Image: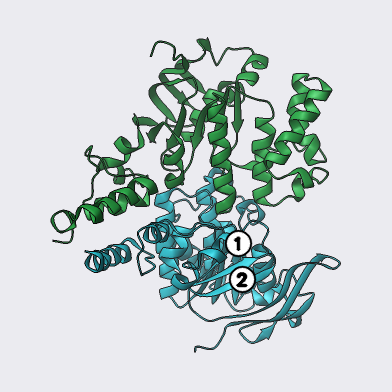
Chain colours: A cyan, B green
Amino acid sequence: MVDAIIKVDGLWFAYKEDEYVLQNIDIQFDDKPTAIVGQNGAGKTTFVKVLKGLLKPSKGDVWIAGTNTKETTVAQLSKTIGLVFQNPSDQMFKSKVIDEVMFGPLNIWKDKKDKNFAYEQSVKALKIVELDNRLEEHPYDLTLSERKLLCLASIIAMDPKIIILDEPTIAQDRFSTRKLAEIIKELIKDGKVVLTITHDMDFVAENFERTVIFYQGQVLDDGPTGKVLSNEENVVTAHLELPNLVKLAKALDFKTTPLTIDDFIEGFSMYKKAEG
Amino acid sequence: MGNVSTKVSIEHLTYKYPFAENVSLEDITLSIDAGQSIGIIGRNGAGKSTLCYVLSGLIPRFFHGKITGKVTIDGEDVPTMPIERLIRKVGLVLQNPFSQISGAKMTVYEEVAFGLENLGIEKDEMHERIDTVLRQFDLYKKKDENPFELSGGQLQRLAIASVLVLKPEILILDEPTSQLDPRGTTEVFETISQLKTLGITILIVEHKFEKLVEYVDKIALLHEGKLLGYDTAEHIFSTSEIETYGVGQPIYTALCKRMGLKKANGYYPVSFGETAALMNGLKESGMDRRTYDG
């Protein structure tokens, strides 16, 4: 196994004293694209804020690329781990698209890199999300869908090894969701570790190798996506639903768990032969 | 069907936001019967939310700009109808629940009461209505909390509850499930289907097509401000052009198109039930070798 870039040991977290929203979590992440799923309020967002160092563990430890988050600053961690917030308004504060994206690079590299470099990195990041023709616009003139992509670009521009997306598919139409899947694939190809929180089970099935189910502050299931999403009992417990193709395959008594249309067609022909 | 009355009528509606270069809605004509439920689909920027604003009267009262054409509810002109009458007819749940919350109320309970207070509803009835919707949307335990301390999912349910409590005749929901987990999404759709049995006319903007097609009578397809289709889901999604608009289609329809599987009526399936029945039927009839799998 590839070395874990994120290690979480006996993590507990409470916002209010003794009300633990994360309870005794032990988990590691390597470079496999991973989806984090679970009902509203299961602790997913809190968990990724702890990974990013915005919240410190109440008990237990989190190591990001070998550094304990308790022994460093959020600014230091930003070079390694980036979090794209669910609500873009929580992340944006500049009056131009380009300035918004440049803020991170200018600040985390202020010792060694110059302004031109920050600009180039930012334009490159905006190109990835296809907003590079909107540099001078006000972020609030963008649609919600575009603002979410802008926030993703702001993180990409800092070039962290780990990129976490919190509900990136909210407010995206189907076309933009496909575009987002392409961007995630690019990032993975580029050597990034991508973790994504989402409720879109079809998006999970199609794009992530590994799936972690959160339930009431704990990890209910964790493993290869096909395996995790074929366990209907866990999926239902966690207020989730099977991906549409998996649901269909179950209704037809498939022996396999198809995650994509191609998988389904292959499974269907095998099933026809077996049944026929 | 002489007893079905037209609830909403839109004729040649064109609208341009102030300072916008282009129109956001262009020559839209459609009518909705009382008690029908309509899905509105289209890409981001297609004009879906703008159409919701026109029907709820936010355009031209809040968003000015230039509006032409005719929009009526029960035969009455929407842009000029007195607001106190319009507000009893139409309820709008905004896309972003943060925008829906008044910001003036300190508790969930007061937030839901806000609209009723403005309508001057009797106190006893108010309490009864509020209790009912809070329980319906699983918010009763949160009734004393500050709305801004709720999660995204709870806030979205609060936004819907605060509109439903007004008992509108027409309910417009702009992506009401975007923040919700799959179970929460299903619950909202089930609520919508209950409202339908009460005769409420429903318009719903939604990208979750697999769910949407189970609950609506018709779908309006908007693209760049124009109405490109207004028909049943199978008509809308069976066309080959649907993909060129970038709007997408139910995954079941995409699957059946790939496999060349059509229903007896010549259209592709759109829902889970239709697709499962069709595929099971193939198994039963042994027709698979001819229609599929070569």
Tag 1 secondary structure: loop
| The label number, if any, that marks residue B11 in the structure image | none
Q: What residue type is disc 1 on?
A: Ala
- Quadrant into which the N terminus of chain B falls: top left
- Crowdedness of circle 1 by 10 Å Cα count: few (<14), some, many (20+)? many
Q: Residue beneath label 2, please?
A: A220
Callout 2 secondary element: strand
Query: Residue shown at 53%/81% (left/top)?
Result: A30
Q: What residue type is disc 2 on?
A: Leu
Provide residue A239's location: percent of width, then percent of height.
59, 57
Q: Which residue is mark 1?
A: A238
Q: Residue drawn 43% across and 66% down?
A: A207
Q: Position of residue B204 (x, y in %)?
A: 50, 35
Q: Chain of mark 1?
A: A
Does A138 appear above or below A12? above
Above or below, comparing residue B127 to residue A194 in the picture: above
